[in-house]
Amino acid sequence: MSFRPLHDRVLVRRLDADAKTAGGIIIPDTAQEKPQEGEVVAVGPGARDDSGNLQPLDLKAGDRVLFGKWSGTEIRLDGEDLLIMKGSDIMGVIEVDAKAEKAA
């Protein structure tokens, strides 16, 4: 099944949080917070301004983004848990530069 968000909405897949602390302590599932980082799956065409012109979003599928803790509406599509949220709920895009990618 395919899904296309309307207006300025974005479909996001949460990225899994680490289950260990920096010191090596394993955090059980029940104590973990929901991650605030995700990957954009689909983007709507954008919102219309007061004069009726379409204002496209600065996001595209595949972008890694940060969003608010209580942002979005949780849905289930094809057995996968996803979030639908407005583009304004997304705080920013995480960009990985080439040097950091080679080091990892």
Image (cartoon, rainbow, N blue to C red):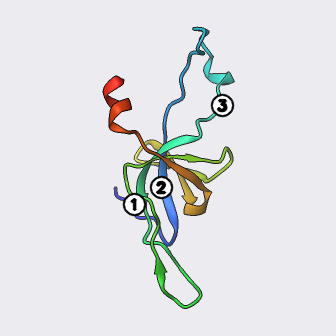
Q: Is residue 94 left or right of residue 32?
A: left
Say what amino acid the circle numbered 3 marks.
Answer: Glu
| Residue identifier under label 2 | 11
User: Quarter holding the C terminus?
Assistant: top left
Task: State the image coordinates of residue 35 (x, y, percent, origin top left).
Answer: 58, 36
| Residue identifier under label 3 | 33
Q: Nearer the viewer, mark 1 or mark 2?
A: 2
Which circle's residue, 3 or 2, is located before the other in the chain?
2
Say what amino acid the circle numbered 1 marks.
Answer: Phe
**Residue 95 position (above or below residue 4):** above
Task: State the image coordinates of residue 19 (x, y, percent, origin top left).
Answer: 55, 19
- Circle 1 residues within 10 Å: few <14, some 14–19, many ≥20: few
Which circle's residue, 1 or 2, is located before the other in the chain?
1
Whether pointer 1 and pointer 2 mark residues with C-beta atoms closer than 8 Å, the reply is yes
Task: State the image coordinates of residue 7 (x, y, percent, origin top left).
Answer: 50, 72
Say what amino acid the circle numbered 2 marks.
Answer: Leu
**Secondary element at tag 2:** strand
Residue lying at the far front in this picture: please name it.
99
Q: Along the line of sight, which residue is nearer the eye, 95 or 88? A: 95
**Residue 53 position (above or below residue 22):** below
How far separated are the C-alphas under marks 1 and 2? 9 Å
**Secondary element at tag 1:** loop
The circle on residue 3 is: 1
The circle on residue 35 is: none
Residue beneath the point at 62% across and 16% down: 27
- Circle 3 residues within 10 Å: few <14, some 14–19, many ≥20: few
How far separated are the C-alphas under marks 3 and 2? 20 Å
Which circle's residue, 3 or 1, is located before the other in the chain?
1
How far separated are the C-alphas under marks 3 and 1? 27 Å
